Image (tube, rainbow, N blue to C red):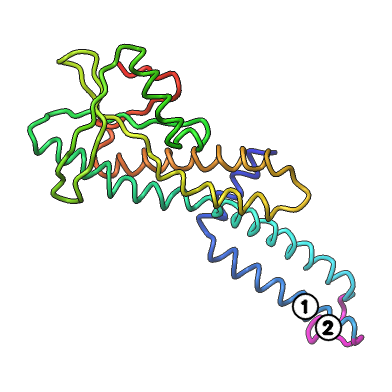
Amino acid sequence: MKKSQNNLLNFAASNIKFFTLLSYLLNAITAIIIVFWLLKKTIPYFENFDLEALVTIVSFFAVALNQINRKLFERTEYSPADVLALGYVNNFLLPVITQLKEDGIKNPSLCVYKPGKINELEASNIDVIKAELRNKNYLLQEVKLNLRQARARDILTIQKNENNQIYFDFPNTLLSLLNYIDYKAESKANTCSDKLKIELGISLITKFYSKVEELAKEKRIHKNIKFCDGDLNLF
């Protein structure tokens, strides 16, 4: 049942204009039939139809389409993650990888931290993560990378030995979603705010990294990008 619903929503998403127009049309037809029914008038060419039955049938399909459009709208509520991913790839990952290659590094590796919760990217938590990396005998160093396609950036390098070095980044751009999550959670009536915030956060994180991977493949830098979580297994 769940699979069928997802398939229907995917089909509707690929034909969203048609479904939206059809929903408007059915709602308008329902309203017209109700007016004729209340006025006890017959509709031309439908004189032999029972208007009450006709209202019920048309309303059923209108409500069904409205539900589909509502589900599609809920899907688009996570679009801020797509916007952030686009900016992150175009304004950071792509310029950094391009510059490293232009500097003579044939196969640069940039690891992006993937948090379980967005607040892991707050400064105090990042300091803890860096301390954990040092305790794992990683050598951490901040270097300034001059980018032709963007402003100069300080970027973290992590290495175990001279021949094994990666660049590392905490995508703290995700912190800008915290206010969005608070707003969405507070605007939902009759729901547990804390539970909803966690669910929204997980959904946004998943959407962000999925979009980053998609865009990285599109920009041909996916082989230079990898991800790590709280386990911090880098090499």
Q: Is residue 70 above or below residue 36?
A: above
> What is the chief secondary structure element of the magenta stretch?
loop
Q: Is residue 48 left or right of residue 169?
A: right
Q: Position of residue 14 (x, y in %)?
A: 50, 55
Q: Is residue 130 above or below residue 218?
A: above
Q: Nearer the viewer, residue 14 or 140?
A: 140
Q: Residue at x 17, y 41 (%)?
A: 98
Is residue 47 covered in magenta? yes
| Residue 127 falls in image quadrant | top left
Hey, which residue is sitting farthest left in the picture? Answer: 104
Q: Is residue 9 above or below residue 97?
A: below
Q: Is residue 35 left or right of residue 136?
A: right
The quarter in which the C terminus is drawn is: top left
Q: Residue at x 21, y 40 (%)?
A: 96
Which residue bears the numbered disc 2? 35
Q: Amino acid at mark 2?
A: Val
Q: Position of residue 102 (x, y in %)?
A: 9, 39
Magenta-colored span: 39-49
3D distance between C-alphas at marks 1 and 2: 6 Å
- Pointers 1 and 2 in contact (C-beta within 8 Å): yes
Q: Residue at x 23, y 19 (%)?
A: 159
Q: Position of residue 143 (x, y in %)?
A: 19, 33
| Residue 142 falls in image quadrant | top left
Within 10 angstroms of label 2, few (less than 14), some, or many (20 or more) residues? few
Q: Which mark is residue 31?
A: 1
Q: Residue at x 75, y 53 (%)?
A: 189
Q: Secondary structure at mark 1?
A: helix
The quarter in which the N terminus is drawn is: top right
